């Protein structure tokens, strides 16, 4: 099956693209989870969140988007079909008007997981990167450190699909092995998007693997799944080739005792600034 990954078409199961593996079998063993994170650079956990809670969050986001006139009114709300002329919508912020979403991201289930992973109390940044990605759009390849590297580097991203996300709807893809691309970590990975005016490294996933090695990996996601990874793992998204919005959110977690990136933490995070 051919998939649009960033600006390329790649064959699933071919030399450049494979399936992500889940770590559900390790959930009872925190040391094994740490080792898997160290080894693979990510943890895919199926059913990490409560699926019903995620679907409630989805509904409240779609209701908001419907009020904004972004959805096709002749179709079911749950399907999230784009209205004619609608485009991708980035809804980054504290999203206090979406309590069902915050229940998923700030609840005991997630924070308890990170308390165990860090072996001490964790916190989450108030800022949540909520996205409705429309037809024809995708996210270019990048390390998250470039966007949120002013606090601890021992910070994790949790990417959560808010609904079932088929390959065609453009879920996240990871570059396996990229957490060990030392040269890239030293160069691109030492940049700061606000200070250096830098963002995605490239839209072309093969530019990376041809230069540094590694292999791209993705999967089809279900509401409730979570993809957890550190600041130095390259990722991009598949292109959404459907007329349904791909809803997802990325949120950040770290040990409460470590320094935070003040652009994203606190009740009124300032967001990007010099
Ligand atoms: O959802 C996307 O398209 C991008 C997400 C992302 O870059 C992240 O989770 O850090």
Image (cartoon, rainbow, N blue to C red):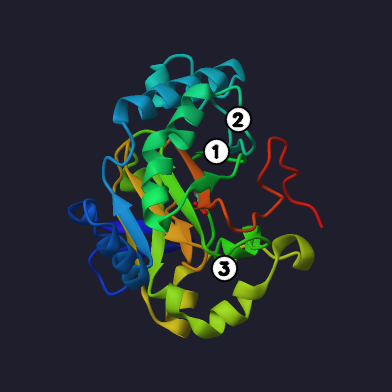
Of mark 3 and mark 2, the one earlier in the sequence is 2
Q: Nearer the viewer, mark 3 or mark 2?
A: 2
Pick the quarter of the image with the C terminus. bottom right
Residue 235 horizontal side relative to residue 25, left or right: right
Question: What is the number of the mark on residue 130?
Answer: 1
In the image, farthest residue toward the left: 25
Distance of label 1 from label 2 (alpha carbons) = 8 Å
Of mark 1 and mark 3, the one earlier in the sequence is 1
Element type at mark 2: loop
Q: Residues within 10 Å of mark 1 (few under 14, many from 20)?
A: many
Disc 1 + disc 2, Cβ < 8 Å? yes
Q: Which residue is mark 2?
A: 95
Element type at mark 1: strand
Q: Is residue 8 above or below residue 79?
A: below
Q: Nearer the viewer, mark 1 or mark 3?
A: 1
Q: Residue drawn at (56%, 23%), measured in percent from left and top?
A: 65
Across and down, in percent, residue 59 comes to 43, 21
Q: Which residue is mark 3?
A: 202
């Amino acid at each position: 099956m051919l998939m649009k990954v960033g600006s390329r078409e790649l064959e699933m199961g071919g030399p450049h693209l494979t399936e992500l593996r889940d770590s559900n079998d390790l959930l009872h063993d925190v040391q094994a989870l740490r080792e898997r994170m160290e080894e693979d650079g990510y943890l895919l956990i199926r059913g990490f969140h409560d699926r019903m809670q995620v679907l409630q969050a989805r509904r409240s986001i779609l209701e908001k988007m419907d009020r904004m006139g972004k959805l096709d009114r002749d179709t079911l709300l749950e399907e999230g079909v784009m209205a004619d002329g609608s485009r991708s919508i980035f809804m980054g912020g504290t999203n206090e008007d979406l309590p069902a979403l915050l229940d998923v991201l700030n609840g005991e289930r997630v924070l308890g997981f990170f308390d165990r992973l860090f072996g001490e109390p964790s916190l989450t940044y108030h800022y949540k990167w909520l996205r409705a990605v429309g037809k024809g759009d995708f996210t270019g390849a990048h390390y998250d450190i470039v966007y949120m590297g002013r606090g601890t580097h021992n910070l994790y991203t949790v990417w959560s699909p808010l609904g079932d996300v088929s390959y065609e709807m453009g879920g996240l893809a990871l570059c396996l092995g990229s957490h060990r691309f030392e040269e890239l970590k030293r160069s691109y990975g030492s940049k700061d998007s606000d200070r250096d005016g830098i963002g995605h490294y490239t839209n072309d996933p093969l530019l990376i693997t041809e230069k540094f090695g590694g292999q791209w990996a993705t999967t089809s996601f279900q509401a409730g799944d979570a993809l957890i990874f550190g600041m130095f793992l390259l990722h991009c998204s598949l292109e959404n080739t459907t007329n349904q919005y791909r809803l997802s959110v990325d949120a950040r977690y770290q040990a409460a005792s470590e320094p935070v990136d003040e652009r994203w933490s606190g009740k009124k995070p300032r967001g990007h600034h010099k």
